[in-house]
Amino acid sequence: MPGMPVAFISTTELIIILVILLLLFGGAKLPKLARSLGQAQREFRKSTDETTADSGGENSEESEKKAERSEKKKESTFS
């Protein structure tokens, strides 16, 4: 389909992936896995924001505030 993003995942495919993850890792380890993936994503965003700030993009204070807001959102989701 032209115009569709390459990384588009339908709801059915997402459910299948989640079921496979549940079978592989078990229900107890999934929250820990999700938390670690969130932390890795935050660190990646922080490093890319710092790189952008160093190259003349948005300042580092704004990127830190964005990272803190997203961290608070994710923490409240996993609580």
Image (cartoon, grey):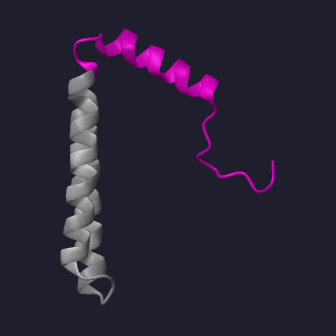
Picture quadrant of residue 61: bottom left
Residue 36, percent from left and from top? 21, 37
Tell me: residue 54, above or below residue 48.
below
Tell me: residue 45, above or below residue 15.
below
> As drawn, is 41 to the left or to the right of 17?
left
Q: Residue at x 25, y 24 (%)?
A: 31
Per the image, is 6 magenta?
A: yes
Residue 51, percent from left and from top? 26, 76
Picture quadrant of residue 76: top left
Q: Residue at x 22, y 49 (%)?
A: 71
- Image label count: 0
> As drawn, is 5 to the left or to the right of 78?
right
Q: Residue at x 64, y 50 (%)?
A: 6
Per the image, is 73 magenta?
A: no
Picture quadrant of residue 52: bottom left
Tell me: residue 43, above or below residue 73.
below
Closer-to-camera residue (59/30)? 59
Tell me: residue 68, above or below residue 47.
above
Residue 65, percent from left and from top? 21, 66
**Quarter occupied by the C terminus:** top left
Instruction: Name, please, the residue furthest toward the bottom.
Output: 56
Residue 42, percent from left and from top? 25, 53
Q: Which residues are magenta?
A: 1-30
